[in-house]
Amino acid sequence: MPAPQTLTGLSEIAEHYDVVLCDVWGVVHDGKVPFGASVQALRRFVDQGGSVVLISNSPRPRTSFIGQLDDIAVDRAAWSAVVTSGDATRAELAKRAPGPAWRVGPERDAGIYEGTGVELTDDLSEAAFISCTGLFDDETDQPEDYRESFADCARRGLEMVCANPDKVVHRGRDLIWCAGALADVYAALGGPVVMAGKPYSAIYDLALKEAATCLGRTPDKSRVLAIGDGLPTDVLGANRQGLDCLFVAGGIHGDDLMNDAGRLDPKKAEALLTQSGAQARYVLKELNW
């Protein structure tokens, strides 16, 4: 597996790509504020004629997700389209309508169910499957808090539809548990889990469809660049799709990949990629132009 090329900025390779599929949380913002250099880099790519599709494992449908981006002032000129795990998961929910589903997740994710035909229940004995968008309270709950309830569901063989494969994200400086961590607990109990977000193909199918709409033609995959900071989601997802990948090493894995001076250590990034069975063509500490 060749070592990734260490970049100083996106401008070094921008001319080789027509489309960027860019992760959001950890690359574009931290859940509270946008990263100015990252937003500027994506805007420069768009200004030069490229298309940027934001591809997020957020369980929210795109309309709600765009509202979230607006709330923290992510410049709309930095992206051309948005696709979320919530969008991809809605098709899985509709297949199982009317359910009912035991909903696991905060009220803010309720939009994912609109128009799917899925009925919801708080009574586990009535549930036909589990729909998980996250923890009920991601600031206080721990994944192990759900083990007892999940054990009963697993014994019954209920499927879990997990709307966010991410296990953790940064919210500011805090690490927040995500739905993927609950899916791990459920799978360890023997429960079947279905996911449609990164690294699975459904979300990439949607993203490439959006890219085709932006370009006015089907994109050549050799000219599509995936950017992300998550090895099991962004990087492995790009690998499975045969896409070039730019690994943003200063994101979720950043604490392990810097030297004593706080600079990216390319050898550490290469070793982590190899250990994870992942491959990135490029590596960069933080997305910038």
Image (cartoon, rainbow, N blue to C red):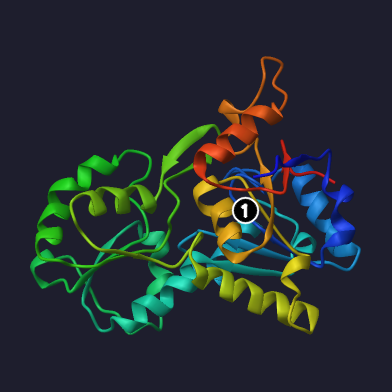
Query: Badge 1 is on which residue?
Result: 24
Residue 112 % position (x, y): 42, 71
| Residue 267 to residue 279: above or below | above
Residue 195 % position (x, y): 39, 65
Identify the residue shown where x is 58% and y is 69%.
204
Q: Quadrant of residue 261?
A: top right
Identify the residue shown where x is 79% and y is 78%.
215
Looking at the rendered structure, the secondary structure element under dot 1 is: loop
Instruction: Say whether residue 252 is visible.
Output: no
Q: Nearer the viewer, residue 281 or 166?
A: 281
Identify the residue shown where x is 22% and y is 70%.
129
Residue 242 in the figure: left or right of residue 44? left
Residue 241 % position (x, y): 60, 65
> Tag 1: residue type?
Val
| Residue 131 to residue 136: above or below | below
Q: Residue furthest front?
A: 1
Residue 65 % position (x, y): 56, 63
Q: Nearer the viewer, residue 248 or 283?
A: 283
Q: Quadrant of residue 139?
A: top left
Residue 191 in the figure: left or right of residue 231? left
Instruction: Say whether residue 19 is visible.
Output: yes
Identify the residue shown where x is 45% and y is 51%.
166
